[in-house]
Amino acid sequence: MRTILRLFLLFAFAMAAKAQTPKYEMRAVWLTTIGGIDWPHSYATSAYSVDVQKRELTTILDQLRQAGINTVLLQTRVRSTTIFPSGMEPWDGCLSGKPGTSPGYDALQFAIDECHKRGIECHAWIVTIPVGKWNSYGCRQLRQRNPKLIVKIGDEGYMNPEKGETGDYLARFCREVTRRYDIDGIHLDYIRYPETWKLKVGRQQGRQYITSIVRKISQAVRQEKPWVMLSCSPIGKYDDLSRYKSGGWNANTTVCQDAQAWLREGLMDALMPMMYFQGSNFYPFAVNWKEFAYGRIVAPGLAVYMLHPKERNWGLDIIKREMYVLREQGLGHTFFRSKFLTDNTKGVYKFTKDFNRTPALIPPMDWTGRQAPRPARQLDVKRGMTTDRISWRGAQDCSGADYLLYNIYASEHYPVDINDARCLIGTRLRQTSLVVPHSGRPLNYAVTAVDRYGQESTPIESQRLQKAPVKVDFRRLIVGKPRKRYKRR
């Protein structure tokens, strides 16, 4: 009863503080490509249909940005098939309608570019152990090249986690993605034993096999680009707790997925545990993930799909309570999956827009010990009747990455408080200029440089002004040249 009371009070405190939005918070969504269930909803077979497919994705990304989402986990390796031209595996059929056939463009590159235009991080979601139906195109291709690595369970194929070559193969694949693309993260899915696997080794040995795969992937990615965030989606309950049991389904014991150790050892930067539960099956286990985060990022997965009448028909209050408590605990949130959010299932999109009323930055990977970038220089403001155009000179990077990004703050007060999320009006800009609508009232501005680890420099500020308060709608900001807007067909 005391634990239940504590959770109730926790929720009450979270509700009382709901007007405050944090500056740092991972707000992510899984964007599924398998079968086109989130995207795409049509096949690319001509120049026109390629354009339709691209417009559909940009519409989704616009909706996600409006809802304050700052991280898209894009399903990139589907089932031993890909959404980009890989040297290791064939095209998935979700894009062209035919497995092994190119859609006529690089969907991963397009998605990265469009995410970055909107200040959103794009992480390549890699499905690791499952490789699809035994006779599917991708599984057949993989079996022909690596027959000893694939195990058949029922009519499904799986990479054998007990073979050292499995980790080598997946590390090469993740290295290929990291080397070729300006990706912000590698997100590992199903990095565990299949639930149908008849485990013949001890649990400790099983955990060592899975951790060995994770270690090889981590080393390969960090050797290429150490700023690329490593994350995974473990089973939602790490293990049994002293007062709450996991019901026989947990990460550590059931499927040998020691995700908390991966954070402790620095093999992972973030976890998105699949917490598709409610009540006492959710809150104590969420607190457990936080207690063993070791300073890293935890953004539990929320089951917005359960809101749908054809699923569990949950009430929206279940998701709302979970989001409030996660925020109070300093944790992020990840939606499974994109379409249930953007379809506004039971009002979840509308609520999320209000909940994320100001933008948020992804927590910096300051555990890497990297030096923060130097500040930008020479901030200029050209003031107009209804808009200001601000510009600045670029800063110097100390991280070794290809480029820096910039965050923009605005306030009627001087100096601008860059710790107040309400002042944050532009995030992760690669350009060095921004047009800010201000309804005829001038503002004070501050600009910080941001490296690829998310670390900010000290700010450079504009000349002091003392004017009446003004509300800036960050969703209407114009970055560089205005983008062409397409009409929805």
Image (cartoon, rainbow, N blue to C red):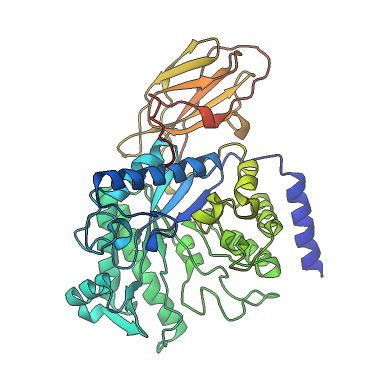
Toward the viewer: 357 or 428? 357
Classify residue 439 as left or right of residue 317: left
* Residue at x 51% of width, y 65% of height: 260
* Residue at x 21% of width, y 80% of height: 147
Residue 336 at x, y = what percent? 52, 59
Toward the viewer: 230 or 386? 386
Residue 235 at x, y = what percent? 52, 70
Q: Quadrant location of the C terminus?
A: top left
Is the residue 151 above or below the residue 329 in the image? below
* Residue at x 54% of width, y 39% of height: 66
Q: Quadrant location of the N terminus?
A: bottom right
Residue 190 at x, y = what percent? 42, 69
**Number of numbered tags placed on the structure image:** 0
Residue 93 at x, y = what percent? 29, 62
Residue 355: image quadrant is: top right
Would you say residue 366 is visible in this rendering?
A: no
